[in-house]
Image (cartoon, rainbow, N blue to C red):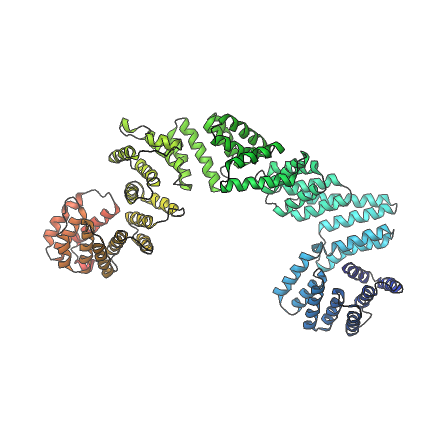
């Protein structure tokens, strides 16, 4: 019925409804299919304005009563109601038409126009979108209807009507859109060229075909031509038996940057379903050269090759999916190896399968056999970045590093690669330079890798090895110890860390702080999150580069290492950077952990109190937190007493401060001496305070904390400002 509606609309445009009416009246006399014919007749009279809207409504209602409901009859009523301005009834009947036949796309168009007329553009756009999605070739103004009518008239040698059917399409575009798309012009020229040829006018036919080819070439050469237009032109050229030219358009679509997966799949399914496997392989071979990473192109090329090899594609793809599941889920190794051999027996040109079986043999220690499969993988899929990286890694480790470096040099590191690909490239290059004993260049590249993945054991081991070789340590420390050798060989089952820890402490004594930090990171990874190893890591971080350590630890939080101890570590390191507010945020987060141990709470409260004291705010809370920390800590060490004394001093409670400060032995603790001087100052003994403080000014500032203490001393020492006023 929809085709009849379009023919009626076309006849109305051509002013030829009389012929349509005569045709339908003649058919009625046969007495067959009366419901459909009466509906067609009513639609023709309605569109030819041979009856009023009210009369047309009555006719359609009578048809429904006698022959039952139909989408066409409801549509006719809706159309009449729309003409009368009765939009509510029109909407109801258009919806009834869609209920009767969801493919009656004309009703979507009617609904969109009503909503536009009533000012509801949002709903208008919604229904027009549905119309565009459902209508065949809708974006070309009901192209399919005109095309079919043209072909039907041409087959009946009704040449004038065939030309009119296709030319009215361009007229529709000009009247409704103001311009006719190039692709529609191409179709019209080729269709009318065929009509002219059928009439014996070869000169006219050739002229039209030449103009069509010219327009088609312009579209092909224009880099801005959308892929949908190129596809349409290709289909048009196919229809008019110019398959060789159509292939050029398919190739351009597949080779273009940013092509849609849907279009790739559309072209692939078209050729493969038609059995054009050689052409499909030709198309996707070229597309692969342009886009070796594109999964849709790779899949279509694989299917083309499978078809040409006579392999049962469905069975092979099921096996391939099972392979993916076994690899992802760590399935049975025997089944995995059997499946890999089965797939290879069917088809040897699948690079993914070759790579997987190579991995299996490599894990089994069969380097020679693994190498054969890696070679086959690279020969098949060497343009793929992942394949090239995988092959380069094998060659770097087991063959010639220079060959691996040559492969790596062809990969553009400036391209928008995933982070893991960047890391892999830098890592392999760092490995190359380490093998060439250029440890400095290796370290430069390793730092790029560690910025992406700062907790990778392999990267850390190589960083430690590089730093050892570049250090000025004592000769007996400049060697790769047993732990590093074991970790390099991924043999960490029976590692004795005592020797490693002893060497690390000696390196720290020789001020190799970057090397110590890298070793402490390694140690922490294998210490099951022990507090002692974390404390040593934090101390090493503060001596080396606290800013780098905050980045590394926050990266660690994004893994399964999330714990209150890491929050504490971040708080301590931000304190080292003297970013006290940020430090406080991390320490407060630590206290939010459920069932936090008493000792851990004591640590958090103590550090928070210290932050508040030095920020010069929340004095009462600083005292409260410091007291909580002392009460919770069974050890009551000197540092907790010192911080509590400082909190009382800040709060102006001098006597309380003295009680706790007297319990602390100053010794070499510069901060205790600072507080002792402050206590004297607050008691009015300014000269005694100055005598205590004066030696502190000669001590080098090795931390931001001590630098701030000296700044405070200078403020009181020279300005003589009262303590409470100064704060």
Q: Is residue 165 visible?
A: yes
Q: In this rendered view, identify the residue nearer to me: 359 or 439.
A: 359
Locate residue 18, reporting x and y percent. 86, 64
Classify residue 241 as left or right of residue 609: right
**Quarter of the view holding residue 426:** top left
Which quadrant is the C terminus positioned in? Answer: bottom left
Locate residue 262, reporting x and y percent. 63, 47
Q: In this rendered view, identify the residue nearer to me: 531 or 336.
A: 336
The residue under the point 20% across, 53% down is: 643
Classify residue 346 as left or right of residue 390: right
Classify residue 466 as left or right of residue 81: left
Q: In this rendered view, identify the residue nearer to me: 238 or 213.
A: 238
Q: In this rendered view, identify the residue nearer to me: 64 or 410.
A: 64
Classify residue 684 as left or right of residue 156: left
Q: Is residue 294 visible?
A: no
The residue under the point 42% across, 29% down is: 433
Which quadrant is the N terminus positioned in? Answer: bottom right
Q: How many marks?
A: 0
Q: Is residue 197 above or below residue 519?
A: below
Locate residue 238, reporting x and y percent. 75, 43
Locate residue 105, reporting x and y percent. 71, 60
The residue under the point 74% across, 64% down is: 71
């Amino acid at each position: 019925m929809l085709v009849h509606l379009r023919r009626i609309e076309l006849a109305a445009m051509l002013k030829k409804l009389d012929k349509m009416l005569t045709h339908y009246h003649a058919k009625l006399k046969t007495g067959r299919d009366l419901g459909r014919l009466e509906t067609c007749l009513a639609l023709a009279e309605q569109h030819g304005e041979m009856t009023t809207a009210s009369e047309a409504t009555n006719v359609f209602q009578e048809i429904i009563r006698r022959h039952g409901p139909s989408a066409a009859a409801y549509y006719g009523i809706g159309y009449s109601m729309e003409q009368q301005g009765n939009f509510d009834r029109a909407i109801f009947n258009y919806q009834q038409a869609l209920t009767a036949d969801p493919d009656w796309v004309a009703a979507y168009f009617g609904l969109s126009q009503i909503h536009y007329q009533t000012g509801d553009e949002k709903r208008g756009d919604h229904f027009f979108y549905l119309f565009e999605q459902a209508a065949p070739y809708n974006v070309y103004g009901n192209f399919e209807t005109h095309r079919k009518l043209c072909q039907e008239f041409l087959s009946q040698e009704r040449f004038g009507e065939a030309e009119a059917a296709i030319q009215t399409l361009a007229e529709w575009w000009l009247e409704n859109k103001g311009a006719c798309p190039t692709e529609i012009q191409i179709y019209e020229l080729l269709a009318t060229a065929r009509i002219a040829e059928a009439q014996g006018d070869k000169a006219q036919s050739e002229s039209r075909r030449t103009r069509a080819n010219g327009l088609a070439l312009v579209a092909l050469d224009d880099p801005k031509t959308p892929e949908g237009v190129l596809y349409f032109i290709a289909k048009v050229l196919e229809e008019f038996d110019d398959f060789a030219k159509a292939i050029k358009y398919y190739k351009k679509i597949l080779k273009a940057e940013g092509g849609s997966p849907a279009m790739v799949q559309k072209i692939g399914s078209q050729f493969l379903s038609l059995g054009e496997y050689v052409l499909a392989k030709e198309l996707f071979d070229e597309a692969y050269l342009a886009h070796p990473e594109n999964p849709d192109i790779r899949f279509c090329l694989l299917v083309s090759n499978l078809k040409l090899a006579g392999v049962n594609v469905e069975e092979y793809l099921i096996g391939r999916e099972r392979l993916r599941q076994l690899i992802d889920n760590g399935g049975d190794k025997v089944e995995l190896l059997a499946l890999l051999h089965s797939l290879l027996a069917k088809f040897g040109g699948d690079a993914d399968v070759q790579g997987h079986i190579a991995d299996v043999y490599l894990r089994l220690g069969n380097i020679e056999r693994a190498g054969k499969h890696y070679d086959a993988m690279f020969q098949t899929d060497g343009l793929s970045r992942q394949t090239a990286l995988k092959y380069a890694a094998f060659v770097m480790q087991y063959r010639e590093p220079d060959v691996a470096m040559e492969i790596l040099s062809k990969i553009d590191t400036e391209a928008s690669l995933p982070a893991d690909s960047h890391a892999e490239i830098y890592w392999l290059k760092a490995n190359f330079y380490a093998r060439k004993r250029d440890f400095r260049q290796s370290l430069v590249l390793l730092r790029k890798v560690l910025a992406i993945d700062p907790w990778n054991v392999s990267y850390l081991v190589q960083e430690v090895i590089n730093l050892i070789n570049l250090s000025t340590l004592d000769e007996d420390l400049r060697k790769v110890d047993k732990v590093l050798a074991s970790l390099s060989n991924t043999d960490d089952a029976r590692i004795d860390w005592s020797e490693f820890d002893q060497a690390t402490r000696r390196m720290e004594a020789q001020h190799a702080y970057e090397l110590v930090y890298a070793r402490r990171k390694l140690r922490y990874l294998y210490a099951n999150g022990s507090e002692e190893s974390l404390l040593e890591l934090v101390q090493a971080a503060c001596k080396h580069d606290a800013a780098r350590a905050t980045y590394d630890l926050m990266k660690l939080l994004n893994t399964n290492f999330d714990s209150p101890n890491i929050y504490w570590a971040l708080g301590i390191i931000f304190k080292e950077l003297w970013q006290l507010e940020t430090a406080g945020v991390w320490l407060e987060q630590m206290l939010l952990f459920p069932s936090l141990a008493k000792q851990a709470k004591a640590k958090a409260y103590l550090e928070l109190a210290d932050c508040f004291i030095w920020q010069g705010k929340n004095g009462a809370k600083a005292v409260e937190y410091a007291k909580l920390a002392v009460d919770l800590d069974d050890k009551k060490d000197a540092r907790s007493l010192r911080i509590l004394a400082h909190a009382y001093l800040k709060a102006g409670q001098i006597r309380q401060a003295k009680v706790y400060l007297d319990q602390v032995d100053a010794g070499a603790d510069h901060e205790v001496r600072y507080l002792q001087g402050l206590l004297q100052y607050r008691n009015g003994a300014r000269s005694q305070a100055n005598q205590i403080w004066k030696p502190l000014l000669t001590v080098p500032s090795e931390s931001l904390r001590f630098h701030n203490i000296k700044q405070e001393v200078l403020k009181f020492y020279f300005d003589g400002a009262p303590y409470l006023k100064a704060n």
